[in-house]
Image: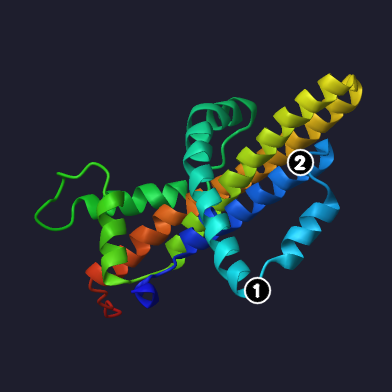
Amino acid sequence: MIEKIRVSLWDLFSFFLSGFLLTAVVLGHLLYLGSISFVQLKDFLFTMPAAQALFVFPLGFTLAGMLLEPIANYFDRWITSPVYELAFKPKQKHKAEELMLAEEIKYLGSLSGKIENPYALCKDYVETKQLSTTFMVFLSRYGFYRNVSFLCIACAVSSAIIATSAGATSKGVVTVVAWTFIAFLFKRRAEDFYSYQAPAVYRAFLIDKLSWVAKDKA
């Protein structure tokens, strides 16, 4: 049964790698606060049997990523994206192409004009027919960078709390500004990949559905 499990790029980027980064951030904070020592961490890693580590770590990172993903998703939807749109001009990469392709698809077949947004239908069709994996590359990279952006914001908040409790306000302000700046860099990169995926889905759908007939030259 295990050999039938399929691992997608979304699982790799948005769950496994994001979970790895989350684990690294948590361990970094625990080491900095002195809750655990580097020696204890090293002893734990080197005393664990290799066969057990090959099972526990991938599963643990993936589970951590699965717990992180919905939190990052809702945080991005309700907080990061509104702030981002106010502070920066959102990129419109491939937007014109996306609208043009969507308009073309709306009037294909017997459902002509009945589907307002054909993206979900086209995505399901492309996935079922396995026409293209390009859009999944874009989608998984979007999810990964969105999760990293959330982790940077979380680091900014924790840095502010740690600096305030230690009485290092000026240092805390610099750290918070740095983490916030990095967070919005990753957010901007996530938006880049988000703008790529819809046109990729529409192109794969149209290539499969349309008949391309060369016109005779006059």
Report x, y in % for residue 20. Answer: 63, 55
What's the mark number on residue 42? none
The kind of residue on which mark 1 rests is Ala
Q: Is residue 160 above or below residue 109?
A: above
**One can see residue 88 in this view:** yes
State how far apart marks 2 and 1 are (Cα).
Answer: 24 Å
Residue designated by label 2: 30
Q: Quadrant of residue 79?
A: top right
Quarter occupied by residue 41: bottom right
According to the picture, the residue beneath numbered tag 1 turns out to be: 50
Q: Position of residue 188 (x, y in %)?
A: 62, 43
Does any portion of residue 193 appear in the rendered image?
no
Three-letter residue code for mark 2: Leu
Residue at the location (56% across, 37% down)?
90
Q: Position of residue 211 (x, y in %)?
A: 23, 73
* Direction from residue 126 to residue 34 in the image, left or right: right
Residue depth check, mark 2 versus mark 1: number of the one nearer the observer: 1
Image location (x, y in percent) of residue 156: 73, 32
Residue at 14% from the left image edge and 50% from the top image edge: 112
Q: Secondary structure at mark 2?
A: helix
| Displayed quadrant of residue 128 | bottom left
Give the answer, above or below, for where 192 lies relative to 169: below
